[in-house]
Image (spheres, rainbow, N blue to C red):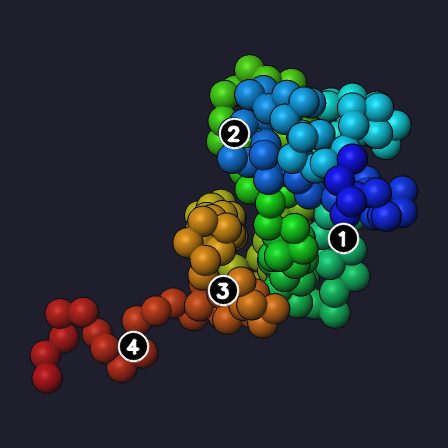
Amino acid sequence: MTATSEFLSGSERARMIARVAACLFAERGYDATGVQAIVEAAGVTKPTLYYHFGSKEGLAQALLTRPLTVLLGDLRSAVEGAEGPLEGLVGFIAEHFAFIREDPDRARFLYAVFFGPLGSSLATELAGFARQFDDLLRDAIARMTREGLVNESRSEAFFTAVRGLIVVRTMDHLYCQSELGTDLARPLVRDLLEGFGARTASAGAGP
């Protein structure tokens, strides 16, 4: 055990192990990262890791399953507790971005699993979370449709655009060091609803 980890409390040591593991899982892949590599990088012993997490699988649960369960609750509250459907969508996107900012290594691990090999047990579990995420986003958009903010015939295209923007902005933040500001959600929603063209321009119109 290193001098640094020796003086950490139990909860601090667990968080440190989780941070190290998330970084290694993101860099090398979950299946390619053994317990020995994690404890060596964290400066702890295998019994210490097993004490806090039980196994490598338990560590993955702590990094992904539990935080994603909390995130889904936050997303649901953002949609259902908003003052209106527009605020619900803004809150949905803002909560997702806050989750990404909170722990970028964990987020990179999440994306590595989600876009990695399809047969792993972690990928199967994440697919279930992704379906719940999509259901909540569709609910937020359905509320906007009922208020006339989104054309019903274009609601699925709007869903795809919102989901795509969330993924692209997140990937840019995690892998290209672009900012993922706390005030980003609202202008993204505004741009989606209002478009990007100049209102005075008319394609094909004369002077």
Horizontal and vertical percent for residue 138? 61, 46
Residue 75 is left or right of residue 157, and the answer is right
**Disc 4 residue crowd, few under 14, some 14–19, many 20+, Cα 10 Å:** few
Q: Earlier in the sequence, mark 1 or mark 3?
A: 1
In which quarter of the view is residue 40 placed?
top right
In the displayed structure, would residue 72 be above or below residue 146? above
| Residue located beneath label 2 in the image | 28
Question: Decide: marks 4, 2 in contact (CB < 8 A)?
Answer: no
Q: Is residue 65 visible?
A: no
Residue at figure coordinates x 67%, y 62% from the top left: 91
Q: Amino acid at mark 1?
A: Asp
Nearer to the camera, 4 or 110: 4
Q: Is residue 106 visible?
A: yes
User: Which secondary structure, mark 2?
Assistant: helix
In which quarter of the view is residue 114 placed?
top right
Q: Amino acid at mark 4?
A: Ala
User: Which secondary structure, mark 1?
Assistant: helix
Q: Nearer the viewer, mark 1 or mark 2?
A: 2
Question: Decide: marks 1, 3 in contact (CB < 8 A)?
Answer: no
Q: Amino acid at mark 3?
A: Glu
Q: CA distance from mark 1 to mark 3?
A: 22 Å
Horizontal and vertical percent for residue 78? 73, 59
